[in-house]
């Protein structure tokens, strides 16, 4: 059977109990309301500054993630009670508190020290976390926590600079895409040992023409191809149209800003899409099979 919809009286009574939970001054009345099961009522009792501290702390320890979020939304929630969520037995509830954008700064600082990495991960992804906290979490031993820090829009440049030396490739790639990347970090990442980082750098939409020009001289075909997709400078595109790597020349051909005569020449050279694919196969499998003659025609 489907549950029956609440009557108007039941909805009104529920609203009254929620209001009483938030506004009652009577410890006895609040204790009776604490026996309710409705999350809104229990959250109201937790946040009520007139609730006995023992009662509020007891309800915090019984709270699930929904009640934690509702309680933290209440402006009247005493700070001392809010901090008790950092001691909750369930990591899931602590993580829910850490994710909440309105969580007190003091609570986030406690949760950033949590032994469970999922809780610290939630703090690292919270855009209301303080700059000091995000700098500290940039040193976290867990890779996923540092990933969250580098993706957080509130992360200060001090933390970004530290993470630019991170051994984790994904973190350096995220930094390379940062729209506010300082010139010195661009130069640092341009010399990164992994071409995947330099490819991400080439995809950064805020690079200057001079920065793209420097990347166009990269030793990696992948990086030069990524640059060729982005360039608008006719001279640089002309130079790259003569690149030894087929993938770079194809990127120039696909760039709608390339000069028309250059695209026409490349279209003749590259031929049909089928010929392009065949050429790619030869380039990809040449090292594997020893020579062009050994490349199988039907290799997928």
Image (spheres, helix red, strand yellow):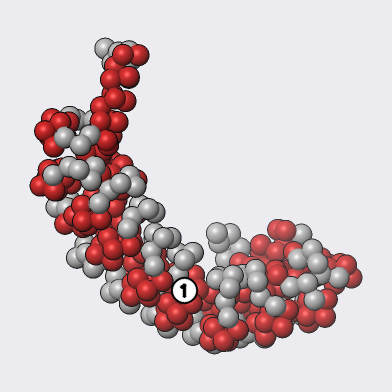
Q: Residue at x 49, y 64 (%)?
A: 153
Residue furthest to the right: 261
Locate residue 150, reporting x and y percent: 44, 69
Locate residue 210, reporting x and y percent: 72, 83
Locate residue 6, reporting x and y percent: 32, 16
Residue 248, image quadrant: bottom right
Left or right placement of residue 27 versus residue 102 in this view: left
Left or right placement of residue 252 versus residue 169 in this view: right
Q: Residues within 10 Å of mark 1 (few under 14, many from 20)?
A: some
Name the foreground residue: 110 vs 198: 110
Q: Residue at x 58, y 73 (%)?
A: 180
Residue 256, image quadrant: bottom right
Name the foreground residue: 2 vs 293: 2
Residue furthest to the front: 25
Left or right placement of residue 162 versus residue 186 in this view: left
Q: Residue at x 24, y 64 (%)?
A: 110
Q: Quadrant of the C terminus?
A: bottom right
**Vertically, is 184 above or below 273?**
below
Q: Which residue is mark 1?
A: 156
**Vertically, is 65 above or below 273?**
above
Q: Quadrant of the N terminus?
A: top left
Tell me the SS state at disc 1: loop
Number of marks drawn:
1
């Amino acid at each position: 059977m489907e549950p029956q919809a609440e009557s108007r009286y039941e909805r009104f009574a529920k609203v009254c109990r929620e209001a009483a939970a938030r506004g009652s001054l009577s410890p006895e009345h609040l204790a009776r309301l604490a026996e309710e099961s409705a999350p809104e009522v229990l959250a109201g009792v937790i946040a009520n500054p007139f609730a006995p501290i023992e009662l509020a702390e007891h309800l915090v320890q019984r709270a699930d993630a929904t009640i934690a979020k509702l309680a933290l939304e209440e402006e009247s929630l005493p700070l001392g009670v809010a901090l008790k969520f950092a001691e909750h037995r369930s990591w899931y509830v602590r993580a829910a508190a850490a994710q909440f954008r309105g969580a007190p700064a003091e609570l986030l600082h406690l949760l950033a020290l949590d032994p469970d990495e999922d809780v610290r991960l939630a703090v690292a992804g919270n855009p209301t976390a303080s700059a000091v906290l995000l700098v500290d979490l940039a040193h976290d031993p867990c890779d996923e926590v540092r990933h969250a820090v580098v993706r957080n829009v509130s992360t200060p440049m001090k933390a970004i600079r530290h993470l630019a030396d991170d051994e984790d490739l994904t973190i350096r790639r995220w930094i390379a895409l940062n729209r506010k990347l300082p010139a010195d970090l661009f130069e640092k990442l341009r010399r990164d040992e992994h071409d995947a980082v330099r490819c991400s750098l080439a995809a950064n939409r805020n690079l200057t023409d001079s920065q793209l020009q420097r990347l166009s001289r990269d030793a990696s075909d992948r990086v030069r191809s990524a640059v060729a997709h982005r360039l608008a400078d006719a001279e640089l595109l002309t130079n790259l149209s003569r690149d030894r790597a087929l993938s770079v020349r194809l990127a120039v051909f696909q760039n709608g800003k390339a000069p028309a005569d250059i695209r026409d020449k490349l279209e003749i050279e590259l031929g049909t899409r089928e010929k392009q694919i065949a050429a790619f196969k030869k380039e990809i499998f040449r090292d594997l099979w020893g020579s062009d003659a050994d490349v199988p025609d039907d290799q997928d």
